[in-house]
Amino acid sequence: MQVIQILGEQLKLRQQVIATATVFFKRFYARNSLKCIDPLLLAPTCVFLASKVEEFGVISNSRLITTLKNKFNYAYTQEFPYRTNHILECEFYLLENLDCCLIVYQPYRPLMQLIHDIGGQEDQLLALTWRVINDSLRTDVSLLYPTISDSDRKNHPHRGQEDQLLALTWRVINDSLRTDVSLLYPPYQIAIGCLQIACVILQKDLKTWFAELTVDFDKIQEIARYVLNLFDLWKTYDEKKDIQALLAKMPKPKTQPSR
C-alpha cells in the first residue's frame, strides 16, 4: 500500500485515484496468491488502471517505472526487472481477475456529507442564539453586561475546528487503506469510524451527534480497532530497515521460460 501511496503522491494524483488503486490491489490478492504476480509489478499496474477508471488521464508507463525505481531502490538488491510492456500485460490480467468490476466507492464523499451535517447542527445553534440575542434587546442586559468584542468574535473556533476535523479524518481514511477495512465494510461506516478517531484525537465532543446516527456501532468500533492497531504497528515498524527481509520471505512468482 505504501508503494501505491508514494507513487500517487510523486505523480501528483488525486487521492481518489490512489484509493481506487489500493482497493484494486487488495481485491486482487484477496483472490490470488503472491505467487501469481510480483506486488512490485501489480502496484504500478493498479495505479495505471485507476487513473483511467477515475478519469484522471492516462499516466506514462515510463514515468511509473522511473518513479518506482527511484523511490524504492532500497527494496530490491538487483536491477529493477520490469519495463513498460510488463505493466500493459499485467493490466489485462488485473482486469480479468477483477471481472471488469472497476467502480469503487470511497469514504470521502460520505465524510463530506457527515461534516456538512455536523456544521449544519452548529449553524442551527448559531441561528437560535442569534434570535435569543435579538429578544434580549427588549431587556436591560445590554446596559448591564458586556458584549463579545470584535477580537473574540474573530477568534471564534467554529469554522476552524470544522476544517481541522475534516482534514484529520481525511488523513485517517487514507491510513485505513493500509488495513483490510475497504474489503470488509461499506464506505459510510469507514467514514464514521475514522471520524470517531479524529474526534478523540482533537478532543471534540460529538457524543450526542453520534448517538443520533442509525448505524451498527459494533461495526464502527471494529473499524476503529483496525486503524488503531495499524497505528500501534507503525510505532515499531521501520520500512527501509525491514522491507528487504519481508520481500525475501514472500513467495515469488514463477517466471515463464523464454522461447
Image (cartoon, rainbow, N blue to C red):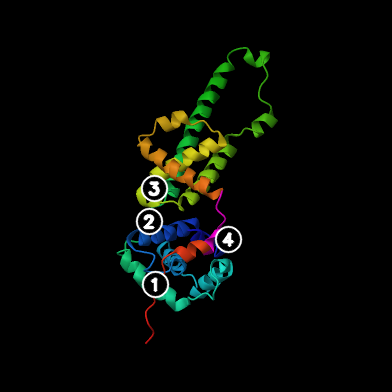
* Distance between mark 4 and mark 1 Cα atoms: 27 Å
Q: Is residue 59 above or below residue 20?
A: below
Which sits earlier in the primary sequence, circle 1 or circle 2? Answer: 1
Q: Main secondary structure of the magenta part?
A: helix
Q: Which mark is residue 104?
A: 2
Residue at disc 1, secondary structure: helix
Q: Which residue is mark 4?
A: 240
What label sits on residue 187 in the rendered view? Answer: 3
Tag in front: 4 or 1: 4
Nearest to N terminus: mark 4 or mark 1: 1
Given contact means CB atoms under 8 Å apart, are the residues at marks 3 and 2 in contact? Answer: no
Q: Between marks 4 and 3, how big is the CA–CA gap?
A: 31 Å
Amino acid marked by disc 4: Lys
Residue 102 in picture, x, y percent from top left: 35, 61
Q: Of tags 1 and 2, which is closer to the observer?
A: 1
Nearest the eye: 253 or 97: 253
Q: Is residue 238 magenta?
A: yes
Question: In terms of secondary structure, where does tag 4 sit?
Answer: helix
First-in-chain label (3 vs 2): 2
